[in-house]
Image (cartoon, rainbow, N blue to C red):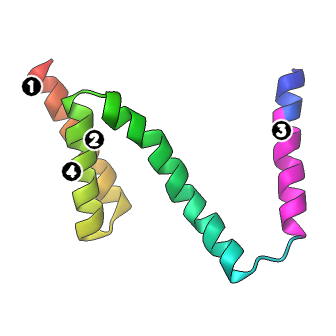
Amino acid sequence: MLMAIIAYGSRVVGLMIMSNVPLSPLVRRFVDAMSSSVLIAVITPMIVHGDGGARLAAAAAGAVAIGLRSPLASIAVGMFCAASWRWWFS
């Protein structure tokens, strides 16, 4: 219960602090880039330590994301590739 209170409190306090901080264009770009860097930090270990399905899904999703610029299509293609790989090779 104490850990839940601390986690919730740190998020609420962080939001309260950031609501009073003016965001310059440089800070706004930094905050916008953080979401991409967190996503990359989560996905990279899965690609490095994953099986062929994970690698195929990442490559296909990346290609679709660059080509179509559609997150939904990218996710769908990645899921389809990973599922297909595992159905055929597992």
Check disc 1 and give the amino acid type.
Answer: Trp
Q: Find residue 79 and name its label.
A: 2
Secondary element at tag 3:
helix
Looking at the image, residue 58 lies above or below residue 32: above
CA separation in Å, label 2 and label 4 = 10 Å
State the image quarter where residue 31 is shown: bottom right
Check disc 3 and give the amino acid type.
Answer: Tyr
Mark 1 or 4 closer to N-term? 4
Secondary element at tag 1:
helix
Looking at the image, residue 84 lies above or below residue 29: above
**Rendered-image quadrant of the C terminus:** top left
Whether residue 80 can be seen here: no
Which residue lies under the disc numbered 1?
Answer: 88
Q: Find residue 8 and name its label.
A: 3
Question: How far across and down, in percent of the image, does residue 8 sit?
Answer: 83, 38
Mark 2 or 4 closer to N-term? 4
Whether residue 16 can be seen here: yes
- Residue in the image at 30% along x and 55% along y: 74
* Span of residues in magenta: 7-20
- Residue in the image at 32% along x and 37% along y: 47
Looking at the image, residue 28 sits to the left or right of residue 18; the answer is: left
- Residue in the image at 28% along x and 49% along y: 76
| Nearer to the camera, 24 or 69 | 24
**Rendered-image quadrant of the N terminus:** top right
Which residue lies under the disc numbered 4?
Answer: 60
